[in-house]
Amino acid sequence: FSSPREPSVSSTPLNSTMLSASNTAAGSRPSRYEERKSNFAMKFAGGHVSSDNVVESALQFGKTHTVSKMVDTSTFLDFLEHPGCERNMSYDDMRDEVLARGEGKVVENDTMLVDTGKFTGRCPKDRYIVDAGEAHNNVDWGEVNIPIKESTFNKVFECCAERLWSLEKVYVFDGFVGASKKSRRAVRVVTELAWHHHFCTNMFIRPTAEELAEFKPDITIINSKAIFEQWKEEGLRSETCVAVDMDRGLGVVTGTQYSGEMKKGAFSMMNYMLPLQGIMSMHCSATVGPAGDTAIFFGLSGTGKTTLSADTTRFLIGDDEHGWDEDGVFNLEGGCYAKMIDLNPVKEPLIHAAIRKDAILENVVVDEAGNCDYKDGSRTENTRGSYPMWHIPNHEPTGKAGHAKNVIFLTCDAFGVLPPVSKLTTEQALYHLVSGYTAKVAGTEMGVTEPTATFSTCFGGAFMPLPPKKYAELFRAKIEKHEVNVYLVNTGWTGGAYGVGKRMDIVATRNIVAAILDGSIEKAPMSAPDRHFQLQFPTELGSIDPTVLDPSKAWADNGAFEAMCSKLSAMYAKNWTKYVKDPFMAALSNYGPGGAALL
């Protein structure tokens, strides 16, 4: 058997026994299953394969250990029965597998380096949610949450699965999303590439031997190089398809090798499932101090979530995805996925030290000796590194902590007019959570080469399937019940907009965060609410230059500053017009830019 090239696979609708509710029992099927297994063996030996639908027969008649709790018990998605299945490999075995297959190479610090191919970031315009079942009424449909017909999803899913069943080897990772056993979901990810298996091992929560023996997935995501030829006829934007079915707990990734699509697919499902249980889900990092005080950092990729949560004085709960229930804050992941561009051992010592054996570097430029040049963005600005949580020495091993005391919204203001830090009222906190203003940082998404102003619901709109009001109501309940302090911190530009001003110094930002966490900011003198954004900020704060704290003083041209404030304020107001039909949301607009509630 020789590894196939990336074939064009014609797909047909999935058999109802596979993906739709039916009453067919597992029954007796050893003879048919053994026949199919024999056919696989023949193919590997170069012999003839039955023209029957391979994936349909293999899934229908293969013994199932993996019936999803989100799917009817008669549904079979048992890739464990693939003759070449590798399940939950050890780190050493994964390393050998990746190298043997030529998928990566070892570079400095004994780290694995891979290339993600054509796509070096997510493909948000090729991301879909199945419009069927309860999701039809629950999902906030639009430009972000793009609907896909269930029949189309089934065809793409089969196309991807058929490719996987045709391969000599497939890799199955079984683990969990969510450190809280009360609400965690069992996730299975089936991949064609060995390094994707390594990535999932880094990023999801790894099961114990006992948990693995009894494992049954709630979520099943499959990922292969299959090419879905019928994308035009089915109304898709391209042959790339990243789709999830919320009701059946299924996900499929085709046409891209960017690994972040797998973890974000699972995160999107959790952002749908948890809030419907009354549990807040968040695109944030989180830390806990020695005294048990929990801090949350909301923010899009590139705003500083991972960097600011890698704090040597505190314990890291997680760097990107969390839930908040009646017991406190918990991580959804088992690892970190950090941006590598301009990684500096002085400014980011914990992250730099985490890039060692068992970590994966993506698209980082290296010299002939294997030394990494983290400043080189010629391949992409979105160079990445994934590593298990234990690579951070001060991680919180349980992945859980108590209720948050401080919440920080991180925004990368490309216009350079927001203060470095502002204290928010409850209503302002809800307004800015829903607005999620920041800049798309170069490289995080395909086609973004420089910061571009954007509004992303809950600082993670691409992964928030429900209406914004749902997340806002859950957040309000947390603020009021636990007396949470909320701050808006600008990690973007000061002294001018992008191209004129300069990026906020990370050291100054760390000092601001430290003042928030130790409570000293509560004693600082505060400004009156400014007339553009109604924001109050400290006029003095430790050793930080007062001219930096007041954005108007950082600009040389006050007229230009006022004009830019008006421009950004109008953008906030325009963005909020889509919410004004709801009385709850309309009332919040008076606490944002252009409002007058605090003036």
Image: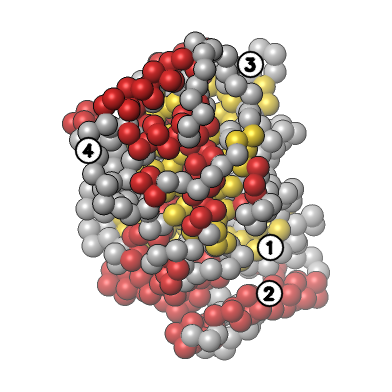
For label 1, the residue is 453
Quadrant of the image occupied by residue 592: bottom right
User: In the drawing, does residue 546 fall left or right of residue 139?
Assistant: right
User: Of the residues under marks 2 and 1, which one precedes in the sequence?
Assistant: 1
User: Of the residues under marks 1 and 3, which one precedes in the sequence?
Assistant: 3
Residue at point 48%, 32% (across, down): 52
For the residues labelled 4 and 3, the Cα–Cα distance comes to 54 Å
Which tag is nearer the camera, tag 1 or tag 4? Answer: 4
Relative to 380, residue 105 above or below: above
For label 2, the residue is 571
For label 4, the residue is 27
Quadrant of the image occupied by residue 545: bottom right
For label 3, the residue is 370
Q: Specify the amino acid type for callout 4.
A: Gly
Relative to 165, residue 371 above or below: above
Q: Nearer the viewer, residue 112 or 197?
A: 197
